[in-house]
Image (cartoon, coloured by chain):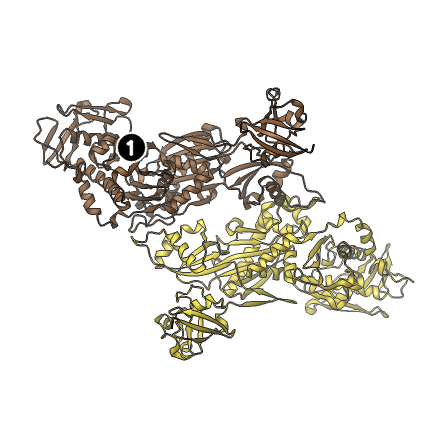
Chain colours: A brown, B yellow
Amino acid sequence: MNQSEITFQPDGKRVTIANGETILEGAIKGGIDIQAICGGTAICGKCKIIINSEKNAVNLITDDEKRILTQLEIQKGYRLACCTVPKGNVTVEIPINSRTGKQRLQIEGIEVPIEFDPFVQKVVLKMTPPALQDLRADAERIMDEVHNILGHNIGIDFNILKKIPHVLRDGDWVVTVTIWNNQKIIDIERGMTFEKNYGVALDIGTTKIAAYLINLYNGSLMAADSIMNPQIPYGEDVVSRITFATKNPNLMSDIIVEGINQLIESLCEKAEVKLYEVYEICAVGNTAMHHTFLRIPSDYLPIAPYVPVVKNSLDIPTEKLKLDIYSYGNVHLLPIIAGFVGGDKVAEILATEIYKSDEICLTLDIGTNTEIALGNKDDILVCSCASGPAFEGAYIKHGIRASTGAIERLKIDPVTFEVTYKTIDDAKPRGICGSAIIDALSEMFKAGIINHRGRINVSLPTPRIVDKKGESKFILLRKDETVLEENLAISQEDIKQLQLAKAAMHAGAALLLKNKGIKIDDVAHVFIAGAFGCYVDPEAAITIGMIPNFPIEIIKSVGNAAGTGARMALLSKESRKMSEEIGRKVRYLELVLDPDFTREYAKSMYIPHKDRISRK
Amino acid sequence: MNQSEITFQPDGKRVTIANGETILEGAIKGGIDIQAICGGTAICGKCKIIINSEKNAVNLITDDEKRILTQLEIQKGYRLACCTVPKGNVTVEIPINSRTGKQRLQIEGIEVPIEFDPFVQKVVLKMTPPALQDLRADAERIMDEVHNILGHNIGIDFNILKKIPHVLRDGDWVVTVTIWNNQKIIDIERGMTFEKNYGVALDIGTTKIAAYLINLYNGSLMAADSIMNPQIPYGEDVVSRITFATKNPNLMSDIIVEGINQLIESLCEKAEVKLYEVYEICAVGNTAMHHTFLRIPSDYLPIAPYVPVVKNSLDIPTEKLKLDIYSYGNVHLLPIIAGFVGGDKVAEILATEIYKSDEICLTLDIGTNTEIALGNKDDILVCSCASGPAFEGAYIKHGIRASTGAIERLKIDPVTFEVTYKTIDDAKPRGICGSAIIDALSEMFKAGIINHRGRINVSLPTPRIVDKKGESKFILLRKDETVLEENLAISQEDIKQLQLAKAAMHAGAALLLKNKGIKIDDVAHVFIAGAFGCYVDPEAAITIGMIPNFPIEIIKSVGNAAGTGARMALLSKESRKMSEEIGRKVRYLELVLDPDFTREYAKSMYIPHKDRISRK
């Protein structure tokens, strides 16, 4: 008998092999999902299998296996596929840990299935040293060996050449090479270090920078954290930040890179990972953050027609960006869409998967600029609305960021005008943050405190309404209920600012719908992304007309979808490819070019909207 | 009539074009050789033609042409092909200056035709600025424009992104981009700088470093010079140099790079070229020089089995090598063949074109290591002979380098033993250099002063032969004929050193012939390369058996063929491709592995060779 048949469980797939071939060779031939990082050289110990046939159906356990497998594993019948040679037909089980498999990525709000297939891969090489009969150069010897394992040619980063001769000889010709994108060897280390392989996903926001440290050997999340963007002292909003950067370009870049370095360092400390074991960063950010992070001038971003310096995705050697991770690693930046629609929006479209959806979806990321995307697998249109920072608390007298003592939720009794509320950490109130600002506007409208035009009804019989010095306001909390020196109120001026902000968002969404010829009823899903979006009460948002009149049940918060998108593009070649496609295909609508813009904006100033005021 | 026929002179090729198309469009369509560096946008003025038909056969001269052409050119009937639209059939002459054409590269000894097609190319772009209706990012706008001209996509070096927005706007949207290998934009400058495009070919030898500054816009040689390798004080020969480098790796690299920087700077000064206008260096060198130049450890080169760290050709960003030319330019290193057969040998094979030859050729580069190649277009075998530095004057009592006062040529009268000679610069003799050392050995043998075994015949009746203190010698010049304090003589010990050296070379050549199964008579050409090779008298070399008994008339000196090869690979994509192929295909023969090596070496110690001693 010159051949045997292997049945692989749990799939039941059958493969015929020649006499003397190993089970691993059979698995590779049959396209069976099994790990074999060392290319079948009995080094990595990843190709563990269980023989379900008689023990003597295969060869005796080898010394290599005795070295790699634990006593317990041997007792349980474990073998290594690369060392096991069938003597006849056998049935073999591949345990879950020996599979490379699909993984699922869990984030707040949504769960996205991705193919785990990172760009950075470590491969163990066991080589024969040079001899007079084999005079291959060190680099070519390595490349030949990698070719044997991967089946194709790759290059070697010039920076690594210096290390090669010593590492090879000190490591006694057993080394681990780190390969980027199946293309290029970017590191070589003595011995077996294939489990020490990490990456960082980065979401660089104007306000917050979030980072995720991820194990690229198995896909697990090692640590995650965020910091306030250290540029904030130089300007709250993007435009003032850019204006400062024009005069101090290096300072703004140094500050943000230093902040990111500290953030990554603290993640690595927590997870006991060495900085030089982090080989890749996958970053998203709005266009202004993208440019300052990369030390590309953003001078022309705030000047019409607001074009960025570069839109395409980028792969940049770490050393160019003064990042403290592995020097010859890679920093990938997702593409950006326009001057005010950045890679964070691309990541959000990736994570919400609207680019794959049959149904029409709308995503919305509320901020100083609110970016809205509308579409499905056929076409996506995005716009950027200059909504301003009112919902982040700026320009609102008692507005503050979402932090301890901020009112985050409130109700107004429509009869008594009594105000009930909740603060963050249940502390004594010191101001009102975005989610409760929306609540307040909505509640005041429902209680008749303000009318469709946002005017405070000063004739209402309540001491909470004050109208003096030519300005009226509604008192939410009396001075003694707060830590303030005065009553906590919403003024007519505050309301005007909020109307301007919500009108910008509503107009953006309305013009997207108009431009794509889509009716409100045709939209199947509305995703509100971003930290702020998590806390917005969809009903209140609809009541004030911050967004068009969608049914409440189709509105869903998806948390930091941009961060999720960055993680997907770090973990999966397929996802990264998709992000490229999103960058290329998504169309940008310049709102000010739309002839209906001014009229739609004016109509959206009404609460909820001029077209939604019921005729009396 | 909807189309016209253009006849292009002097080729006579005919092309039919549609109404309204320009003569340039016709030329491109017909594959006519004409320059159009700006892509037909009436900027570069390179596509000058002469209309040989009636003046009214084409449109009137345009304002662009009036701006670009001189008064005299207009009088002579010159037009620009990109501005000229035929009204019917026309005959057009393309003057030689408007052709891109093949160029010939003249070097000492040999002339090699190459296709002028350098890796670095400058292209002028005249762009439309962004507008609300055209929101392309700066980088993508440039890439689109280049695509229009080159017809394919290219990338942009990350380092350039920072410059882009300012250069575009300061240059009023007319810029020149520098493109490497049709692949990547490596520079952008405001205005039109397409003529400022230079490269350097570099031959890094153990003794000498030669550099050629070349205009990559038209192929002309701007300046050439050489310096002594500044590493010489740290060791004359390669092995002592490597030994020192093992302990002081940075020092040896710094020294050589600094020397190269100074050499290039002086060439640029002479030619009035700015250092930042030099975009590419194409370098060759023996393996040890290659490694130290690149800061790659050469520790294992002198240790058996003498493998290099890397053999393949390399493209390295200039900034990595601390070179003072354009920071984001490219340094190309030709491949190397083995630990003791470097890129200089590849360049020599390229320049002598033996890899294309139908006939069998042998090339020989005499030095401390003498590398010999034997073969033709079907197969080339090389070896490295440890000939030692005797022919460079080392280990020879009165041996000196080829410099002022060195005897470079000599004759001995076979009857009177009278010595006639010539020194460099006709100065009073202070020693004897390589070419005359060979002459001396040959003349002494022919005059019977030494026998087949190299023994001095002390019984000859001449006072020039001295035999005392157990050592015999032949006096070439008496003390008073020289600047020395003693007689200038060749001793028995000197002769032994020379026999060892010439035996190594002869054995190498003989074993190459044996391994390829080729007879002496089958060899059609013998090329002696290198500075030293220029001065060797082929007849003397044959007489002493430094090389096998080839007919004198097939031996040719080819000067610095390695430098020529480097220049070819700088000027021509085709030549560089060929050098890659040479690096891959040439086979290396490790002489010590040949079972006949010891016997052949011993036989080669005879003068001229044991097999050539006529039986008496």
> Is there any visible trace of residue B429 in the rendered image?
no
Q: Position of residue A384 (x, y in %)?
A: 29, 43
Choose top left, top right, bottom left or bottom right for residue A164.
Answer: top right
Q: Position of residue A561 (x, y in %)?
A: 36, 35
Left or right: residue B407 compared with residue A210: right
Q: Residue furthest front?
A: A1
Choose top left, top right, bottom left or bottom right for residue A245.
Answer: top left
Choose top left, top right, bottom left or bottom right for residue B469.
Answer: bottom right
**Nearest the eye: A339 or B253:** A339
Left or right: residue B501 compared with residue A395: right
Left or right: residue A334 compared with residue B99: left
Instruction: Check the image and report above or below for B488 versus A210.
Output: below
> Is there any visible trace of residue B118 in the rendered image?
yes
Residue, x 80% and y 48% (percent of image)? B595
Q: Position of residue A536 (x, y in %)?
A: 27, 31
Instruction: Check the image and report above or below for A596 versus B83.
Output: above
Badge 1 amino acid: Ile
Task: Please give the residue where the numbered disc 1 appears in the rendered image.
Answer: A555
**Circle 1 chain:** A
